[in-house]
Amino acid sequence: MKKQVVVIGLGRFGTSVCKELHNLGHEVLAIDQNFERVNGLTDYSSHAVVADATDEKSLKSLGVRNFDHAIVAIGDNLQSSVLCTLMLKEIGMKKVWVKARDLQHQTILERVGADRVIQPENEMGIRVAHHMDSEKLIDYIDLSKDYSIVELVATEKTANKSLSQLNINAKYGCTILAIKRGEDVNIVPLPSDVIRIGDILIIIGHREDLKRFEDKRV
Ligand code: ADP
């Protein structure tokens, strides 16, 4: 479904969010106080406007409150980022996601009502570390503090074994949700399905169980 999103602050992060939302077909209002940054996004947004996002009157006159979602991507100016977040919540925006530069910034944003706080450098750093930690890990999603879904590439240890032979449910408490082989995705893997080298296994489980399975069996 097409969403209406306002992106405030067109640095590297805001620009990338704005362009991708536009490519995905959403309606994007891009705002920055810097004319050149706004100008650079006219082809990648529905409307690109020069405005001070800490000025309540400007936000109201742009009709920001009619948008479903706001992304505040003012990283370095803590005061502007907090003030803007506070005003967006006060004018009644349901979903305000904000970029923070550090934990202290994140805590303040949560206090003033940000619905989600993102620390892109921190989050990306953690992802890169996980990828370095394991060459078998393709990707992962944390579902909670304890549970994740991981994509692991099958090596010779798992290859040529059927799911029932591996029996990872009983042995490791994890479940194989799907198997990717090239462009094919088997979303209902059967116990008789045999894994080949290079297959990507999509597995859900407790983090510790997933790690045990990855270290011992994949
Ligand atoms: P990144 O680290 O993602 O590159 P920056 O912190 O460098 O992000 O960029 C933040 C952007 O937010 C800049 O383009 C800046 O002009 C814009 N900005 C800062 N304060 C305001 C404000 N009050 N209103 C609108 N835009 C703002």
Image (spheres, rainbow, N blue to C red):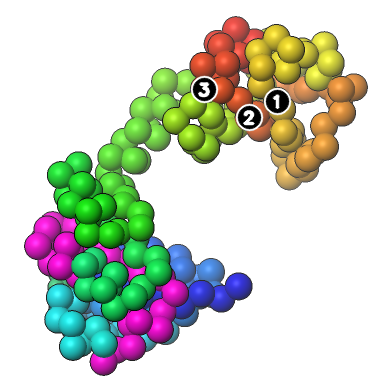
Residue 37 visible within the image: no
Q: Which residues are magenta?
A: 61-84
Q: Is residue 136 above or below residue 128?
A: above
Quadrant for the C terminus, please. top right
Q: Which residue is mark 3?
A: 207
* Residue positioned 22% across, 53% down in the render: 111
- The CA distance from mark 1 to mark 2 is 5 Å
Amino acid type, residue under disc 1 in the picture: Thr
Q: Report how far apart the C-alphas of labels 1 and 3 lie in the structure.
A: 12 Å
- Residue 142 x/y as whole percent: 49, 36
Q: Tell me, yes or no, whether the two marked residues, 1 and 2, touch with CB atoms within 8 Å.
A: yes
- Observer-nearest of 127 and 90: 90
Q: Amino acid at mark 2?
A: Ile
Lower sequence index among marks 1 and 3: 1
The answer to which image quadrant residue 17 occupies is bottom left
User: What residue is disc 1 on?
Assistant: 175
Q: Give the side of residue 94 with respect to residue 168, left or right.
A: left
Is residue 78 a member of the stretch shown in magenta? yes
Tell me if residue 174 is in the magenta stretch. no
Observer-nearest of 24 and 60 = 60
Above or below residue 214? Residue 114 is below
Give amino acid for label 3: Arg
Q: Residues within 10 Å of mark 2 (few under 14, many from 20)?
A: many
The residue depicted at 40 percent of the width and 84 percent of the height is: 66
The image position of residue 74, as x and y in percent, is 20, 63
Q: Earlier in the sequence, mark 1 or mark 2?
A: 1
Tag 2 and tag 3, C-beta contact below 8 Å: no
Judging by the rendered image, the residue that carries numbered circle 2 is: 204
